Image (cartoon, coloured by chain):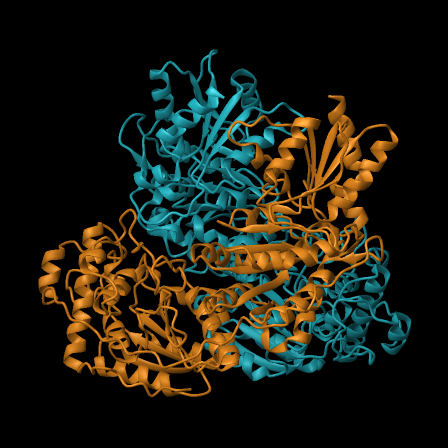
Chain colours: A orange, B cyan
Amino acid sequence: MNDTTAPPEALDDGRLAELAQQLRVDAVRAADAAGSGHPTSSMSAAEIAAVLFGRHLRYDFDQPDHPGNDHLILSKGHASPLLYAAYKAAGAISDEELLTFRKLGSRLEGHPTPRLPWVDVATGSLGQGLPIGVGVALSAKRLEHLPYRTWVLCGDSELAEGSVWEAFEHAGLEGLDNLTAILDINRLGQRGPTRHGWDLDAYARRIQAFGWNTVQIDGHDIDAVDEALATARTTRGAPTAIIARTRKGRGVAAVEDREGMHGKPLPDAKKAIRELGGIRDLRIHVRRPPDADPYPKDGGDRSARLPTYPAGGDEVATRSAFGEALAALGTMHDDVVVLDGEVGDSTKAELFSKEHPERYVECYIAEQQLIGTAVGLGVRGWRPYACTFAAFLTRAHDFLRMAAISRSDINVVGSHSGVSIGEDGPSQMALEDLAMMRAIHGSTVLYPCDANQTARLLPALADRPGVGYLRTTRGTTPVIYSPDEEFPVGGSKVLRSDPADQVTLIAAGITVHQALEAADRLAEDGVKARVIDLYSVKPVDTQTLREAAAETGRFVTVEDHHPEGGLADAVLESFGNGHPMPLLTRLAVHSMPGSATPEQQLEAAGIDASAITAAARTLIDR
Amino acid sequence: MNDTTAPPEALDDGRLAELAQQLRVDAVRAADAAGSGHPTSSMSAAEIAAVLFGRHLRYDFDQPDHPGNDHLILSKGHASPLLYAAYKAAGAISDEELLTFRKLGSRLEGHPTPRLPWVDVATGSLGQGLPIGVGVALSAKRLEHLPYRTWVLCGDSELAEGSVWEAFEHAGLEGLDNLTAILDINRLGQRGPTRHGWDLDAYARRIQAFGWNTVQIDGHDIDAVDEALATARTTRGAPTAIIARTRKGRGVAAVEDREGMHGKPLPDAKKAIRELGGIRDLRIHVRRPPDADPYPKDGGDRSARLPTYPAGGDEVATRSAFGEALAALGTMHDDVVVLDGEVGDSTKAELFSKEHPERYVECYIAEQQLIGTAVGLGVRGWRPYACTFAAFLTRAHDFLRMAAISRSDINVVGSHSGVSIGEDGPSQMALEDLAMMRAIHGSTVLYPCDANQTARLLPALADRPGVGYLRTTRGTTPVIYSPDEEFPVGGSKVLRSDPADQVTLIAAGITVHQALEAADRLAEDGVKARVIDLYSVKPVDTQTLREAAAETGRFVTVEDHHPEGGLADAVLESFGNGHPMPLLTRLAVHSMPGSATPEQQLEAAGIDASAITAAARTLIDR
């Protein structure tokens, strides 16, 4: 680690104190101009920000992509006025822009987002900054071997979030001494005192127990903050948490350490600014990052090939094909990283770990940290695949939602979808994951039905921006596609088609095979049924669906998922804006499953070939 | 606390050791008969279960509703064979039923569910048993003042879940000495060693730091287990965690402490049973619960009235009406309990706390624990309302999913839905909560648009089984309904109607007011538009929607939510089974919002009156 870069212009303690007051004033001004915002939560951390920006952070604001730049994550995102005030002091934004805070079109949103080039990830849902920071720091330590540091400024209320303790655990065990958590213990949450108030020992005991170094300070003492940040930079072998006792609204008597002052502009901003010593315009010369070469991530063996499976050969589980394809993808592209939620033997992600152990991150059973780490690795340009049971991805729903706001490019793979897992029962069955993942802004949702399709869709996912989702199936299924078949995202496959089709059966994943069998049975009765494999659940193949509606007039959708938010709803999206809709029968899992064999489950849920056949007949007879 | 009930028949250590072997044998037999399951995870905790059932648990299996019964939650739900074997030893189920494990129709599911009367909640998604146990124990301590104890048997892998640390924190601070966590540290997770292996100190340090008493033992030593359980029962002022070193697959050399033996029947069950000493049929006389009167929960002042608001009077936020109605509901029914995620001043749940502080549980910013506590209180017959920002409910998605499998009757209230919150930006906006809550099995989803409607829907929610959801809005909206209007669940309100209607505008919540304004504008142009307030998003008013489709042929749906899984999809559910569908234009939030005023947000998202007016015109002109 190279940590010798000297600050270009040392700010003495007096000027840092002045800078802290400036940050307060600017936070007050920004919130006052906006008519909303969190000045008091900003004011408690003003000395912390002043010393961090003035002496310790290494960052080139003209080159946000500089590989040696430190990362600063404002986990307490509501304190955005403080961050923006510091950006102004660093010369990154103008005073004029500062006062656009929270206005239509401004990059200075109520909570920070990457619309600002210096913001890595969106924050504002508490307890996410540290988990993501762990991913960023892990990249430096384990993958890139670069000397940048990761600083995460946390509030005290958010320490109640379990996700923060997943992060403390992960970072402690990985020995991430390049990661510093600065805890702004201002005693007051949104609605009153926090659980531990100013009991700094209570926090220190807990955090130390998770393997961290801790330093307790008066967060308004410039020297103490400086010393603590220096300690954090030089401590080896463990991450450091700086536990800073502060006062919310510090510096303005009308609000300082008072309840009921959360999340609103100061009652009298002019008076407050006077009390804080008036408007200043100090500039900080933030330390430059050390020279650093970006870790080469465009390598890989392009001659490697994805696995292929003989059509009509052995049955293969899509989860197995996924694992094999993932291992091959990792050979082809050395920016692919894989994260496991301690179920890699089931999701088959462990096949990647055997070939690329250095790019495999075990996150244990901590799904929020799983996604947080993926987002953090994404910040550093890796292509993450985070894998667990699809059902347990619900644990990370808020992280996935925020990943979309972060404009994060991550891929998520959920196995063991639907009732077809069989005997394990409903706790292990994902029956709401399609609804969850479709509703993530800008997401891609893919659901393959055979091994070749799975192998082909996996790299396609990596090339899509935003949050990508691949849904796999536990049991084996027939290989119905040839290895050279193409599966564009946004496409579908028409598996059976005839000009005289009377009905269209629309399926994805496990139900494709049931639909094919149903079509055969219907054919025996002289009923012609079109079959569409809608492997791209989002975006959906509007053109093919509209043609099918126009030509057959009747749809039976069949999905191993609850009826809400899944395949049927995706199909109907194609018929917005007044496009004529087909008659539709939706088959889905309406009842609560118990234990049973996969076949019994499909039958009990009414999504097997018999149910499809019956539904199609009824629909045609209407 | 009365803890003097003597066991009817003391089992000596030798017989308890025999009982432990019997539990192992029966776990092996059950998994063998099923062809799947987790015998090795059961075998590690056999002595724990034997001593707990044989000497410490107080439970009347003939009266699962006995108010003095202890509660045992198997957080490591995959070890269900152990639980079922213990039920058999206690005489609750027959050996014949034991061997129906995991078969179609059996109550003995792969992971326990309340289909068995002695199972409080479904487990199987790890890290949920302790959070729920906290709710059960809290009821005894703070609300019911009853001497029952809550025992939670946890695995070691699940201690990586942040939710467990939310629970340790909550229980520690509440001093729940009636709660015992027994940690089965068998060193091996699903795919290999856990993070901490057999480092019992690592667990003890962490848990002690959260204010718990800890005891470390050899989990296969009958005396040690007995002493630890006795210590847990008699320790005052803090909950106790028994940290037990065990060996997975204990007792059968072929699997004991071996990797790759998770979640599968033993390779040679017959041999294993011989090695374990053969089949036994010991019976346990489980200690009877102490006499206890159920806490009276059918009281309350039935003469109290819900708040009413003059129609056409001041604008009122639905979140405010919710808070006022909740306080009144608490007066009318003394089984109503309210849980806050440290945002009670924003959700307005704090209005309840001012009138009924004893039934208000502050869960701080820990949404998993918020829902876990609610489920636990529900186990004891309370009617919980868990309240936070709707966006942050995504944090508890897995808990809500599991609550449905638990057949739990809980209510969830999410405020600050949609872009209409304004300047705070996307991190605070719930735009996927309708999709999430609709896809929860058996859920009820209500979304009021005015104050009177909110007040009336709140008690309706309490009367519904399952997971209920009320979505409220931050800003004020006009009061459009009279105080005596009725709002049945599953109904809707036709606000504008004429036989000559050319289009139907369907809205809920904030968009109802935009739809009404759009209808006015359309009327100025001579276009007649029906307006439906679809306040009951699930179940949905199929009859009214079908009539509107038949009579107007065209729908414009408008929702402050992402396009996937929300109002439009709920509307289209009414047209399954081949019912003819209307032409439809769906207005929803398609782009990523930033900061702006509520009005600007509605305009930018294309869900305001102008957008509705334009969409209706375009649809009619098609």
Decide if residue A344 is in sight here: no
- Up-down relation of residue A553 to residue B220 (above or below): above
**Residue sitting nearer the eye, B59 or A190:** A190
Question: Which residue extends farthest front?
Answer: A303
In the rendered image, which quarter is residue A513 located in?
top right
Residue A514 x %, y %: 78, 43
Residue A86 x %, y %: 25, 67
In the rendered image, which quarter is residue A261 located in?
bottom left
Q: Quadrant of the C terminus of chain A?
A: top right
* Residue A169 left/right relative to A46: right
* Residue A468 left/right relative to A240: right
- Up-down relation of residue B601 to residue A525 (above or below): below
Decide if residue B232 is in sight here: yes
* Residue A246 left/right relative to B42: left
How many callouts does the rendering have?
0
In the rendered image, which quarter is residue B21 located in?
bottom right
**Residue sitting nearer the eye, B193 or A105:** A105
**Residue sitting nearer the eye, A171 or A217:** A171
Q: Residue at x 27, y 72 (%)?
A: A49
- Up-down relation of residue A178 to residue B174 (above or below): below
Q: Quadrant of the N terminus of chain A?
A: bottom left
- Up-down relation of residue B251 to residue B285 (above or below): below
Q: Residue at x 37, y 53 (%)?
A: B357
**Residue sitting nearer the eye, A314 or B344:** A314
Residue A152 x %, y %: 38, 71
Residue B353 x %, y %: 36, 50
